Amino acid sequence: MGTINAITQVTGTGVFVRGDDIDTDRIIPATFLRCVTFDGLGECAFHGERFREDGTSRDHIVDQPQHQGASILVVDENFGCGSSREHAPQALMRFGFKAIVGGSFADIFFGNSTTLGIPCVCMESQDRARLARMVQDTPDAEITVNIDALTITVGTETLPVTLRNSARQALLSGRYDPLNQLIEAKEKVAETASALSYV
């Protein structure tokens, strides 16, 4: 795997998915959890809300032409609540989202997202409503989520965000994936294992 690059900022266009308490089953329905790998999960993100039972489109906001290619997901409160399925942030990442801006996030979803390198930053409701309007009114506007400065910039406007310091430092240092850290330290791991008396 090698060293992971630090994430200091994420830039892209945005899409606003409205609604509090969007749980992990809405993000990725349970029927898609039988996969052996996470490959292909992107097309299943928000599946129950994007498609009818016969497979026809419900014209969900993420499928609308003006939001194609959006990489900044704007959401409301308590996003990612419900069951602690890692598939949820995996699906969002593979759909193309690189950062999520919300009012608040469920703890396990937040942690699973961070280890994938997806910043989940929090924004006050008034500022978030303004950001949502900008995304809706000007869908091709470039949004920059600055992890270092804890700001979001759209055009000439800059809005403040918050991010838990532990997650912020992990992203800024490129040490957000614990599995990668184990691989980087494999020689020390082997040395410690060989010194154990019960091995």
Image (cartoon, rainbow, N blue to C red):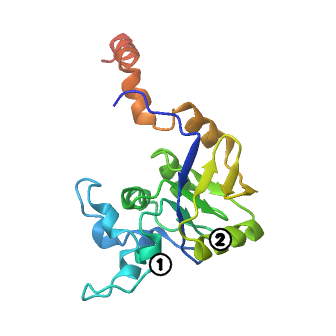
Check disc 2 and give the amino acid type. Answer: Met
Give the secondary structure at mark 1: helix
Residue nearest the observer in this picture, 83 or 175: 175
Can you identify the residue that label 2 sits on? 134
Report how many numbered discs are placed on residues in the image: 2
Measured Cα–Cα span from mark 1 to mark 2: 15 Å
Local crowd size for mark 1, using a 10 Å CA cut-off: few (<14), some (14–19), many (≥20): some
Give the residue at x 37% y 12%: 191
Between 68 and 179, the one lying in front of the other is: 68
The structure residue drawn at horizontal position 71% and vertical position 71%, both measured from the top left corner, is 130
The quarter in which the N terminus is drawn is top left
Q: Secondary structure at mark 2?
A: helix
Q: Is residue 20 visible?
A: no
- Return the mark for residue 61: 1
- Left or right placement of residue 113 versus residue 50 in this view: right
Q: Measured from the top left, where is residue 73 in percent x and y? A: 53, 64
Q: Position of residue 162 (x, y in %)?
A: 71, 52
Position of 110 relative to 42 (above/below):
above
Is tag 1's residue or tag 2's residue first in the polypeptide sequence?
Answer: 1
